[in-house]
Amino acid sequence: MKKHQFLDLAEVNAPYMDEMAEAAGRVIRSGRYVGGVECESFENELGKFLGAPYIIGVSNGLDALRLILKGWVEMGILTPGDEVIVPANTYIASVLAVSDAGLVPVPVDADLTTMNIDTSKIEAAVTPRTKALMVVHLYGRIVWDEKIIELARRYGLKVIEDNAQAIGAEAPVPGFGTSGMAGSLADAGAISFYPTKNLGAVGDAGAVVTGDEKLARVVRALSNYGSDRRYHNIYCGYNCRLDPIQAAMMRVKLPHLKEENDLRRTRARLYDRLITTDAVIKPDIVEDSGDHVWHQYVVRVPGGRRDELKKMLEDEGVMTDIHYAVPFYRQPCYEGRWNPADFPVSEKLASEVLSLPVGPGTKPEDIEEITSVINRFV
Ligand SMILES: *Cc1c(COP(=O)(O)O)cnc(C)c1O
């Protein structure tokens, strides 16, 4: 059988190669290597795509999250020591941004079906110190419902979206004035253009999305040494700017994101149809809604057999990945901060999840071969 890569990044970019090379050449010939028209144009184009008023291109997704939280600290909206609710099964970057801003991450367990934060458990985690809630649209699936909006309103919480994985997903809950594109639903959103993401650069890049003009100004300044104009520093800031080469790459790829996401949905539906073994639990498909862009297609293998299936697939040339085998609350850098027993669903997910290839290089015939191996696992 042919080898099935988990994600071949050169293959992801191959269809755009000529245009990307041309765009990179344009930046090099321009002589403008930091900021400039490529960054401004990309910000405008992304703002149109998301329907969002303010976009600040930044260096990566983690920095986008950090700059939002530090922006709120500079604005006096958050104070070091304030608690920020985060999903227990998220990638560690979400949480690093919180602790880096001097805030206290408070994990809330996941929901087994959506594999996102269990919105019914958020309220129990709210204390008088809780000042913000971070939602993470994990694996490409939007988490956004009336409960989140109502809780945020009732407790006066700022809501930040970690939208590293769901660019292009649309909230499926119109009717209460806050539907729209992932990343633009909450008070502020962070996007990652890490090369493996649905809209990937050829290096690190990210963006902050917000409707708040003041926050936009603060984040822009923080990303540029805390400077609001040349040689005038109002904050002790950072250098977290978007690279114009990366902006130029994404200007080539953004117009194709919708069709790429649609193809991911098609692949997910094909997996859903072709996986028939009872030994594997398929992800919820969320039919006929645009609220899942399948950054990952994540199955669960119960009974302590995940690694057995992973090995069996590998022996047949099918590469898979695990997002994430060790939750952030078990990482050495957070040693002793939390008790894993408080997050039974996240613990279960960490031992059961397996990500199958779902990226642009995975064709329908690949999925037929991959699922024929999976169906032998009983
Ligand atoms: C990738 C990712 C990030 C970080 O983005 P970078 O651009 O790699 O810094 C943050 N949160 C989640 C959920 C991610 O998947």
Image: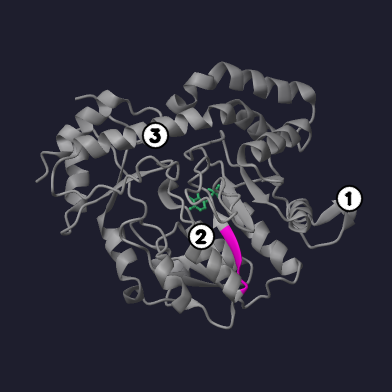
Instruction: Please name the amino acid that badge 2 sits on.
Output: Val
Q: Residues within 10 Å of mark 2 (few under 14, many from 20)?
A: many
Asked if the beta carbon under badge 1 is closer than 8 A to the nearest atom of ligand 1, the reply is no
Seen in the image, is 29 located left or right of residue 339?
A: right
Q: What residue would you read off at disc 2?
A: 135
Residue at 76 percent across and 37 percent down: it is 34
What residue range appears in magenta?
A: 156-160
Res. 193 in view: yes
Tell me where residue 18 sits by quadrant: top right
Q: What residue would you read off at disc 1?
A: 229
Q: Position of residue 169 (x, y in %)?
A: 49, 43
User: In this view, which residue lies farthest toward the bottom?
Assistant: 128
Q: Position of residue 282 (x, y in %)?
A: 25, 47
Contact (Cβ within 8 Å) of mark 3 with mark 2 = no
Instruction: Please name the amino acid that badge 3 sits on.
Output: Arg
Dominant SS in magenta: strand
Q: What residue would you read off at disc 3?
A: 264
Seen in the image, is 75 located left or right of residue 142?
A: right
What kind of element bears circle 2?
A: strand
Q: Quadrant of the N terminus?
A: top left
Seen in the image, is 360 located left or right of residue 367?
A: right
Of the pair 208 and 21, the residue shown nearer to us:
208
